Image: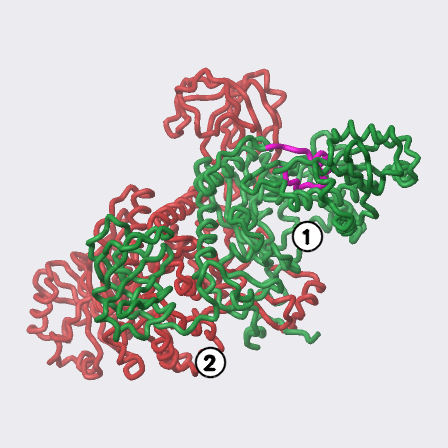
Chain colours: A green, B red
Amino acid sequence: MNRTHTCGELRIEDVGKKVKLAGWVSKRRNLGAICFMDLRDRYGLTQITFTEDWAEKIKDIRNEYVIEVSGTVAKKDVPNPKLATGEIEVIVEEFKLLSSAKTTPLIIADETDALEETRLKYRYLDLRRRPLQANLLIRDKICTIFRNHLHNLNFAEVETPILSKSTPEGARDYLVPSRLYHGKFYALPQSPQIYKQLLMIGGMDRYFQIARCFRDEDLRADRQPEFTQIDIEMSFADEEDIFAVVEGCMRDILKNIKGLELGKFERLKYVDAMEYYGSDKPDLRFDMKLQNINELFKDSEFTIFKNVLANKGVIKALVLKGQAKKLSRKDIDKLQEFVKIYQAKALAYLKYEDGLFSGSLAKAINDNEKDGLVKRLQLENDDIIFIIADDKPIVDAALGALRVKLGHDFNLIDDSQYHFVWITEFPMYEYSKEEGRYVACHHPFTAPKDEDVDKMLSDKGNCYSRAYDLVLNGYELLSGSVRIHNQDMQAKVFEALGLSKEEAKAKFGFFLEAFEYGVPPHCGVGIGLERLTMILCGTDNIKDVVAFPKTASAMCLMAEAPNTVDDLQLKELGIGVKNA
Amino acid sequence: MNRTHTCGELRIEDVGKKVKLAGWVSKRRNLGAICFMDLRDRYGLTQITFTEDWAEKIKDIRNEYVIEVSGTVAKKDVPNPKLATGEIEVIVEEFKLLSSAKTTPLIIADETDALEETRLKYRYLDLRRRPLQANLLIRDKICTIFRNHLHNLNFAEVETPILSKSTPEGARDYLVPSRLYHGKFYALPQSPQIYKQLLMIGGMDRYFQIARCFRDEDLRADRQPEFTQIDIEMSFADEEDIFAVVEGCMRDILKNIKGLELGKFERLKYVDAMEYYGSDKPDLRFDMKLQNINELFKDSEFTIFKNVLANKGVIKALVLKGQAKKLSRKDIDKLQEFVKIYQAKALAYLKYEDGLFSGSLAKAINDNEKDGLVKRLQLENDDIIFIIADDKPIVDAALGALRVKLGHDFNLIDDSQYHFVWITEFPMYEYSKEEGRYVACHHPFTAPKDEDVDKMLSDKGNCYSRAYDLVLNGYELLSGSVRIHNQDMQAKVFEALGLSKEEAKAKFGFFLEAFEYGVPPHCGVGIGLERLTMILCGTDNIKDVVAFPKTASAMCLMAEAPNTVDDLQLKELGIGVKNA
């Protein structure tokens, strides 16, 4: 062992001890003939002090050299209150160079302005930066808390295959050519969905896995081609049971990592989330609900409102309290541009100041309607109302996004809060314009609500399911559902999705067959580990919580993967590269 | 929740309680109008009793139906001492069919004589068998013990990429075609070797990962195309440190799983293991060493011995105590056939009975030599000696294998023992006849022994390394080494392996570059999780400790993976299938 203590360990009580430390030189200062260095490892920084005698031997030592020193702990004349070890220094008595270093292409410091490309290429240097190390340690801690919590509840971690068969999540699979069966391929799993359900059929009762998953998608900023899912499934259980398990895990995590005791988890039906927040992942750290004001305008003379209501559209309002004076015409122009992203044709507004309305709608509505607004929206002086009238999905999406934007822009959000909400009873299907058919909203193994079983084939647009999400501060943290455990029901869902019996058999034959041998009721969730870690680490960049991330074009700049391979390898696999 | 208790939970103290249970019907017996069923889940079996009133409603219920019952716990007239719940039964008051079942293609019982093909195809049914569930639970427990132990020592679990670049372990890689860069491929990792060393260079200090690894090899009985490695790496550490960490883990595991307190772990240099046991994974649960008897025959007149010694070969003996009378000519013939597998030309033997020698060698050696054998081998009445004279590697391999065979055949091995031994100082290189050059014995990042640094290029056959294995009961449980942390040394090893600078750069360029920025001394191990689990579960079949195993030809019979894919998928990947 090159050390008796880490660089984060020594304290004033250790003064006088003979110690050995090892680490990276992180700063070097000469004071006359005396030389001070900060020695760094994962645990901290310790000042080591070289007396004059060492001058010649250490003259070449620079930042990022790895050294080992032995010496005596001494009290520092001027303590450094910023460091846990700041009250002591180590006076060096023996010294050994372990490894030298060139000048690093990025500076090893908490803050960096290095290009992302440089940081990814020299990831091993970027990883020396304390914030990245801290993130990886938090990620590990989250996993540990999950594992302990779930083990205590009799969940067993079971590993499912990576060399597997295409799962029906709908995203593109990564494929692995088989050497033994030319023309056949394994698929890397998008999730262990089918395997975990088979484990329930196999009687494992309570399963979890911190599982690697893969999607060959064009990547967004918060996606990686491989990611990790905390995957849970339980038998003889329903929503209440799985909610209790997940809430227990989250309470443990927030308590251990943030020192917070969480209150009751809210619940909101999907339709209500859309109605009041215009989103199925509402940020509930602030209120500011969307308010339906159709009723106020049912006799409106204003042509736009009239037409919208005649076409079964909706008129919804969002009230920003006490900001009417602050918002300039230009500010409002920007917001009007913003809602267009969400296909809204227009964003109307009304300022309410000293009992009077001004703004784009002020002349279009009558006094009666104005009084109605004051009452319905409980307006106070200096409030500003934003109104969109359009088809409901457009109104919800646009006002929902506007709500979040205003929440951030006007500091309505308390960053120290962690607000969880279960969104329940998602639609069973959603219509895919691309595919010209209904597709599964969650996945095709999701059970419909008992009372909607009859609508499964006849009224797909109004059929709701036992799928649920857990949302934290506006982020979808997990998805899950109560699964179908009955083969007839499963066959019906495939029918509803337009899969013929033959297609269903080809895709899921072995899985459907398993349903013929006694299936327990079961349900589960898949929790995005990176997402949760990002929120707890306070970063928007998924690369900050992944040790060796890939770029948006799925490349590892450090290892240069993917890369070309020998022709012999391809020949063995029976495949060839086609020219574009 | 479909239950208040599991099927393994109720005891005599619960008599009188109202309970709800759910599970699979595992046996049904009618006694007049009363019907008894065993209800099964992962936790156990409980007898449930249906009174006459239920007869009509339950008449169709058969084995493997999933049911839910509510009722009252009652004391059984005749307890079943084999069951933890054997003193009670539940008298059914409510009943619900949850899922029906066809007759299963294999019987759900502890013992099965179903074909392996059937068991793999219906793995979800095979998994209902208690021994398989128990194995998966032990596997999970082993992981938990490792994680706890390592976390307590400040090791952090870090996930490394699965979509990665070819690692140089020498086995064949599984490849994943890139959709965005046609003609380029990811490789699935054979181990996280390079990533974990980069984590050390990145200052993570102590890393572990329970990591999925992949090898596209023609499979032997104890191999799977994907397997799990408990991967550990630590900085500022050497053999003593890593041995202490691993021994601590193993002590925890044996204590928790087998209730055993382990003694001191033995250590044996590679050359001594070969000398005394003819194997680098000696089973030390019994002694029976190979003994070099060259000295006794240095003046032998016996042509074979003379020639062998003249050619720098060796003569070694193995003594089987007290079995001379038992072994027939036919038994010995079989052993003589056995050693031929290991290229030995002949197996000589001598029986020592009543002070006299008989057997194939009895006439070839003189009295002096016979006396020498008695003394040197401490012969007692009824011992039998096996002798092979040949080149050392052949003698070691053949007698080493014979030793293990005799150990098993003559019950010399105490099955309840867990005998660990570290094998140290492996050769740095081994000569590959196939490739016509020296290859790395462990992997090319292994440090040479300090005193052998000079031999690295000049005397490869006599250069030993700081690589080590941990062997348990004759199985190699893990491999590891102290790594090179100096770029010049690393370059030298590549040179010794016949890699040109260009080749080394193309293969490991980014890794070599990392060595220029300050590298801590580090070392580590990779532990085969399946191997360890197999030993602790007492099975020789790796499929018994994998939830969804593949066949020897790397196929999943259940999911039918690998399989054909859409032409469109291949087109997107820019690859085509070539006809053989």
Q: Nearer the viewer, residue A26 or B275?
A: A26
Q: Quadrant of the C terminus of chain A?
A: bottom right
Residues drawn in magenta: A266-284
Q: Is residue B266 left or right of residue A514?
A: left
In the image, what residue type sits under mark 2? Glu
Q: Is residue B5 visible?
A: yes
Q: Is residue B555 left or right of residue B437?
A: right
Q: Is A152 drawn above or below residue A167 in the view shown?
A: above
SS at circle 1: loop
Disc 2 is attached to a residue of which chain?
Answer: B
Residue A389 image offset from top left, x and y in percent: 83, 40
Mark number, residue A41: none
Q: Which residue is mark 1?
A: A170
Residue B224 image offset from top left, x and y in percent: 47, 58
Residue A205 image offset from top left, x and y in percent: 51, 37
Residue at x 61% of width, y 67% of height:
B177
Disc 1 is attached to a residue of which chain?
Answer: A
Q: CA distance from mark 2 to mark 1?
A: 41 Å
Q: Which residue is mark 2?
A: B503
Name the residue furthest front: A354
Q: Nearer the viewer, residue A232 or A224?
A: A224
Residue at x 30% of width, y 67% of height:
A31
Q: Is residue B279 left or right of residue A233?
A: left
In the image, what residue type sits under mark 1? Gly
Residue at x 56% of width, y 57% of height:
A226
Q: Quadrant of the N terminus of chain A?
A: bottom left
Residue A441 within the segment the image draws in magenta? no
